[in-house]
Image: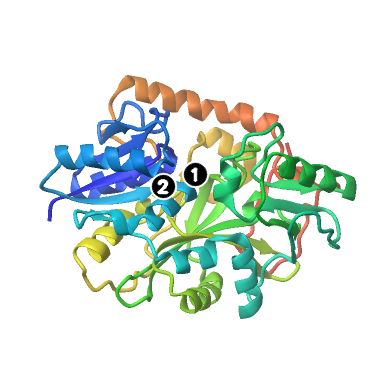
Amino acid sequence: MNFTPVIMGANRGSYSLARAFYEKYGVKTIIISPFQTGPVRNSRILEFYYQVDMQDFTALTCTMAAIQKDYPETQKIIFGSDDRYVELLIKNRTHFSSKWVVPYSDYESYISVVDKTNFSNLCEQLDILHPRTVVLRESETFELAYPVIIKAAQTTEYHNLDFEGKNKVYICQHEEEAATIISRIRQAGYTSDLLVQEYIPGDDTHLGIVTVYVSQKDLQIKLFSYANVLVDDPTPSAIGNSLAGWVREEKQVEEPISRMIAATGFYGFATFDVKYDARRNDYVFFEMNGRLGLSNYYVTAAGYNVAAYYIEDFLLKKELSFAPFKKEIIYSALTNHLLEHRVEFPKLRTMPVVHPLVAAYETNWLRKLYIGISTLNFYRKLWKYKSLEGKVKPIETKYTSFNPHVLHTKKL
């Protein structure tokens, strides 16, 4: 079958998915974006269609018409690189012709898990370990021991706001700080729920990403892929985006995820953010995204090409089998020198290391220059910004744990 992948957005996750398509099928991917960002610029595997207002569905239909005119014979499969675009595609999928496939769950199943309030309620109903959470509507107060985490329940609405001091996630040490942040978010125009959650202690290496694939055909999980975060991006707007991770097997997260999927009817790719809580010797579930994450190339690099799941399930309608764990790797957007400086990890010198943006077939020198500068820029970012753990006083660095995989971030 001839097909053309189309991705809305131009971030590292977009390139990672396009890379998977190129490496598996040898096809180029179309990127719809207002401009070319560094991760996608000067790439030989991408084509570009420019659209200024990415959330205007009328503008999108014009862009899609232009693509259809240029690629009349192929089946198009269209993706969103973040929650805003995925939600736009899901809500409007009935307007697409049969030449276009939207490989996401139905809206009811999607919103039942990606809305953070709904996710917290689901964990409560299924008795799945998650942070103690208070949902704030308008000006309600809360009773949780400090420090606490504050974040928006509706990422799509929050993403569209722009205000001074905007962070993806906030950590508050006391009531006055929390009140100031809540007021700032509300004054910026955010109207949906805010979540106030207990802080789970542990440095970056206690964080984990779980990518799963659920077949559209039988609603069964066909893939679990776990990445033990080594370094998380501390930039205020990017907290929660991992810069380096160790892909390994982690059976402990599979049973609770299976129960969540069974309870919702969700299908397609999903990404769970978890954190190992050494006090409980178990994983705490923070949230679920109903799409591939920014770091999705780790799944492909570890032996399971993410593009193949989309094509075989949504276009070829094949029966998918469960994928057993294959191999351990490290994915990293950092230099090995910086990674060794940040994390105590003996396997770093012996394990394969994959950079999500570096590929042998990408030979453009301007692209190589961007990647080199971007990689070096993380020295500045990791020096300038503290991680969430680093903002907690006193910093908790000693844990009693039976988990043999727990690593530690070095004190800098």
Of residues 408 and 10, the one nearer the viewer is 10
* Nearer to us in this view, 392 or 51: 51
Q: Position of residue 295 (x, y in %)?
A: 46, 47
Inspect this view and state whether residue 403 appears.
no
Work out whether 104 lies above or below 15: below
Q: Residues within 10 Å of mark 2 (few under 14, many from 20)?
A: some
Which residue is identified by label 1? 349
Is residue 103 at all visible to an observer of this figure?
Answer: yes
Give the residue type at disc 2.
Pro
Q: Residue at left 71%, top 55%? A: 202
Q: Is residue 370 above or below residue 174?
A: above
Q: Are marks 2 and 1 in contact (CB under 8 Å)?
A: no
In this view, the residue in front, 227 or 71, is 71
Residue name at image x 47 percent, y 78 percent: 262
Q: Residue furthest left?
A: 73
Q: Where is residue 339 drawn, in percent x and y?
A: 57, 39
Spot occupied by residue 158 in the image (x, y as percentages of width and height): 61, 45
Residue at left offset 65%, top offset 63%? 276
Disc number lying in front (2 or 1): 2
Residue type at the position of mark 1? Arg
Instruction: Return the mark for residue 352.
Output: 2
Q: Quadrant of residue 128?
A: bottom right
Residue 399 falls in image quadrant: bottom right
Residue 286 appears in which quarter of the rendering? bottom right
